[in-house]
Amino acid sequence: MKEKLANFWYYHKWHILVAVFLVAVIVVCTVQTCRHTGHDYTLMYAGPKTLATPEVSALCATVSDIAAKAEGAEKTAELHHYPVNLEPGHASGGETYQNLENFDNEILAGQAIILLISPALYNRVIESNGGLLPLDAYIPADTDPAAFYDDTHYALKLSSLDLYTTPGFSALPEDTLLCLRTSVSVTGLFQRKKSEEAHLAHQRLFYALVDRETEPQTSDQ
């Protein structure tokens, strides 16, 4: 049997190696396809409030409308939603720990680039270093300094922006902070280029969200 196996490997090793390579390529492509959401933009809300489905839909619709006006083409958005309350005295259960783990994974290597987070979670990211970008290069030059959460300029107070009056966003807690996550480092030329393009697109959207003109909207608060 050993001799037969040795002969089989000798005569067919290249066929086997090619087959293994093709299977690996198919598996990787399948995984990437399954992970692809089909949306142009991905945002994340993480904080003490549990958003209802209509509120999530309204927020995504607002983002899509703003993006479509800025880009001149129809766009879609999704929201990753992790209810996490780190306030002192709040009882933390298993679901909170799971959501906190999901939040940490999003910061580390997730799809969400534009972040809507509570001050407590903002402090958690800042303490870990490297998760957020300073916003001066991604916002209008005339942005009111009072709109920043602190003097590091890593976060804008959502309540200080016109955006807070729009459907979906107006459902978020008043102390919610708007941040921009750093770009995730990926291997492979194609994947790296795709990741960089996605981050640039979210940077443009971030600017549009901050710089949007005030329009009459029906608040969902």
Image (tube, helix red, strand yellow):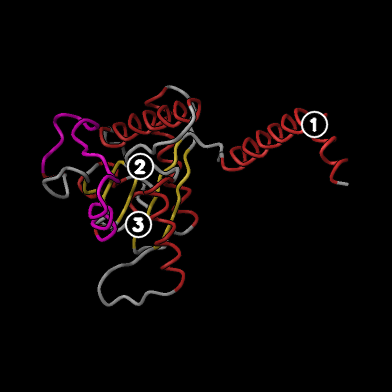
Label 3, residues with CA under 10 Å away: few <14, some 14-19, many ≥20 = few
Q: As drawn, is 137 to the left or to the right of 49?
A: left
Q: Which residues lie in the magenta part?
A: 120-145
What x and y, as percent, mark residue 152?
A: 14, 45
Q: Is residue 86 above or below residue 141?
A: below
Q: Answer with mark 1 or mark 3, whichever residue precedes in sequence.
A: 1
Q: Answer with mark 3 or mark 2, whichever residue precedes in sequence.
A: 2
Point out the frontmost of discs 3 and 2. Answer: 2
Q: Which residue is mark 2?
A: 114
Point out the frontmost of discs 1 and 2. Answer: 1
Per the image, label 2 sits on a secondary structure element best described as strand
Q: Amino acid at mark 1?
A: Tyr
Q: Is residue 144 above or below residue 12?
A: below
Point out the frontmost of discs 1 and 3. Answer: 1
What x and y, as percent, mark residue 193?
A: 45, 26
Q: Give the quadrant of the C terminus.
A: bottom left
Quadrant assignment, res 72: top left
Of 146 and 94, nearer the camera is 94
Of 9 and 51, nearer the camera is 9
Q: Which mark is residue 10?
A: 1
Q: Amino acid at mark 3?
A: Gln
What x and y, as percent, mark residue 112?
A: 41, 44
Quadrant assignment, res 7: top right
Tell me how far mark 1 sits from mark 3, CA to CA: 71 Å
Of 3 and 99, nearer the camera is 3
Quadrant assignment, res 82: bottom left
Q: Is residue 21 above or below residue 53?
A: above
